[in-house]
Image: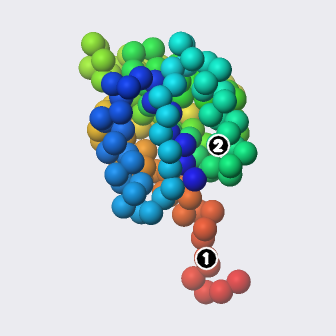
Amino acid sequence: MIGILIGSESDREVMLNCTEKLEEFGIVHSMVVASAHREPNKVTKHIQSWENLGYKIIIAAAGMSAALPGVVASQTNLPVIGVPMKSDLMGIDSLLSIVQMPKGVPVACMSVGKHGAINAALYAKRILDMHNFDPPYGS
C-alpha cells in the first residue's frame, strides 16, 4: 500500500526505521532506490507501477538537493511524504529543498533523518486510517 523511494543506497539504513514501523502496523510496503537526477525514468516507472497496483501513499527520502519528493509529487496525485536525509549541511539543505516546493507540487515534509523516517510511517498510517474510518455510532 505504500511505496518508498530512496535517492541512494546510503539512505536505506535510516529508512529501515520507517519500514520497521510500517511492519509493526502490518502495512504492506516496498522500497526502491531510484535517484531523481541519475535515474528519472526508473522513478517514473515505479510511480506508475505503484499507482497501477493500488498503492495509496509514496514516501520519498533524499539528501542534499533532495529533488526526489518533488519529482514524485509532480508525477502523481497520490500523497507524497518527504523525508530529508542528513548530508554535509546536517540535512538543512535537504529539509529546505523538500519544504520549498512550488505551488501545485504538494509534499508533506518530515524532520531530518531517523525521526523523520519514523514520523513518515506514522503519518502514512494516519492517512490510511482516514480511508478505513468506521463511524463509532453506525452509519
Above or below, 84 relative to 108? above
Report crowding for label 1: few under 14, some 14 to 19, many 20 or more residues within 10 A (C-alpha).
few
Label 2, on which residue?
Answer: 50
- In front of the other: 8 or 92: 8
Residue depicted at 36% across the width and 38% down the height? 15
SS at circle 1: loop
Whole-percent x and y of residue 35? 51, 20
Q: Dividing the image into 4 quarters, which one contains the C terminus?
A: bottom right
- In the drawing, does residue 100 fall left or right of residue 73? left
Of tags 1 and 2, the one toward the viewer is 2
Residue depicted at 57% across the width and 53% down the height? 1
Residue depicted at 68% across the width and 51% down the height? 54
Q: Is residue 112 in view? A: yes
- In front of the other: 120 or 24: 24
Picture disc at residue 3 = none
Whole-percent x and y of residue 16? 34, 42
Whole-percent x and y of residue 38? 53, 13
> At label 1, which amino acid type do we have?
Asp
Above or below, 116 relative to 101? below
Q: How is the image coloured?
A: rainbow
> At label 2, which amino acid type do we have?
Trp
Q: Is residue 99 in view? A: no
Label 1, on which residue?
Answer: 134
Q: Name which quarter of the figure residue 115 lies in.
A: top left
Q: Label 1 to label 2, Cα distance in Å? A: 26 Å
Q: Name which quarter of the figure residue 77 lies in.
A: top right
Report crowding for label 2: few under 14, some 14 to 19, many 20 or more residues within 10 A (C-alpha).
some
- In the drawing, does residue 86 fall left or right of residue 37? left
Q: Earlier in the sequence, mark 1 or mark 2?
A: 2
